[in-house]
Image: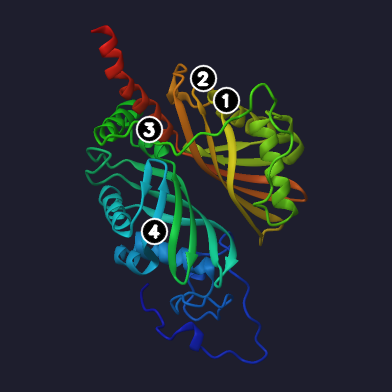
Amino acid sequence: MGNQDTTPVADKKVTASAKAPQVMQVETNDFVDLVPETRQRAHSMEGFDDCYSDIVDYIIRCTHKIWDERDVGLIYTHYTHNCVLYGTMGTMYNREDVVRDTIQRLVSLPERRGLATSVIWNGDDKNGFYTSHLVTGTGRYTQNGHFGKANGRPFVSRTVADCMILRNKIYREWVVSDQMAIILQLGIDPHGYAEKIAASKLSQGLKSLDIGENGLMLGQYPVAEGVDTSIANNDLERKTLEMLHAIYNRKMFGEIRRNYAPTCMYHGPLMKELYGINAVTHQIIGLVGALPDAVYSPQHICSVPDIEGGTKVAVRWVMEGHHLGFGGLESFGDPTGKRVQVMGMSHFHFKDGKIVDEWTVYDELSMLVQIKLAQLADKPSAEEALA
């Protein structure tokens, strides 16, 4: 950050009558207001670098420094040596792999800038913070890299990164980046690109990208009406989990009408911008239709009051099922029967008990790679049968 005041935040004097500032929110602030230079701490931030005044400042400022200012070496002071990063194409288990992966992405997209869109969080500096950081990335493809030959085309995509943080270091991270949105805007054939990735994974001995399967039902019993809400921290979070279970597992799509405002907006994969309950319903049925036996499993939930009114709720979730039907995932084509895992992140904005905005990110490219990988893994057995 240019011309920064190097005086530690903790050492800056505050008058006795001054009140501690509230934790920052992204939605109504310009970037320079999100990374202040002289702000009193809103969190105690024990063990964190002096420049961070609260956890929102931390996640936005360090992300900007690493990705936009290219201070990749800050990963060594902001990630533990044995950090685990769960991505839609695989998992990294150490800091060095995170450093290498970051550099490779900067090589391919040197003009990319990540614009902080929202941060939903919970926790404290004693037990650790959890942040869910929604970013809108923009740029052009101007350097040959993992997408192939550069063509200068622009792109816009969304990413959500969920981080577990203690004493200045991220020790667990989940990243969902809409890579399919990028390659479609760059004019790249998704099937050819997915097959290339699948072939590389197969050559490494991998036959799937999944981490385990959940069962939708036991024997002939129907889906449970109730849902485990033990990860919820308050009534709104419990209500959100119950709603998602009803919609995705019990297929009660009428819950969308009962829980979304008539003027709701849906900001989804492939940079979709949808308006109204009917459009949101069609989008959700499209996902479920492609994976009709999938089970929807929330992994984490947190919420914060929103400066624009109401409350924002962040949910990290996994869907696991098989490509058994036609749906809104148009790149899949005819049903293949292959098993697919979807890791997704959703931010919901509730006002007066209704959802007025939803931001959901999952990567259709990751799902297509899983299908291609399963098909490639089938080839040797098919060839042996015909021999």
Question: Nearer the N terminus, badge 4 or badge 1?
Answer: 4
Q: CA distance from mark 2 to mark 4?
A: 36 Å
Question: Nearer the N terminus, badge 3 or badge 1?
Answer: 3
Residue 355 picture location, percent across and down: 70, 45
Rendered image coloring scheme = rainbow
Q: CA distance from mark 2 to mark 1?
A: 8 Å
Q: Which residue is mark 1?
A: 293
Marks 2 & 1, CB-CB < 8 Å contact: yes
Q: Residue furthest front?
A: 219
Q: Which residue is mark 3?
A: 208
Residue 97 picture location, percent across and down: 30, 54
Q: CA distance from mark 2 to mark 3?
A: 18 Å
Question: Nearer the N terminus, badge 2 or badge 1?
Answer: 1
Q: Which residue is mark 4?
A: 83
* Residue 115 as seen in the image, left or right of residue 263: left
- Residue at x 43% of width, y 32% of height: 367
Mark 2 vs mark 4, foreground winner is: 4
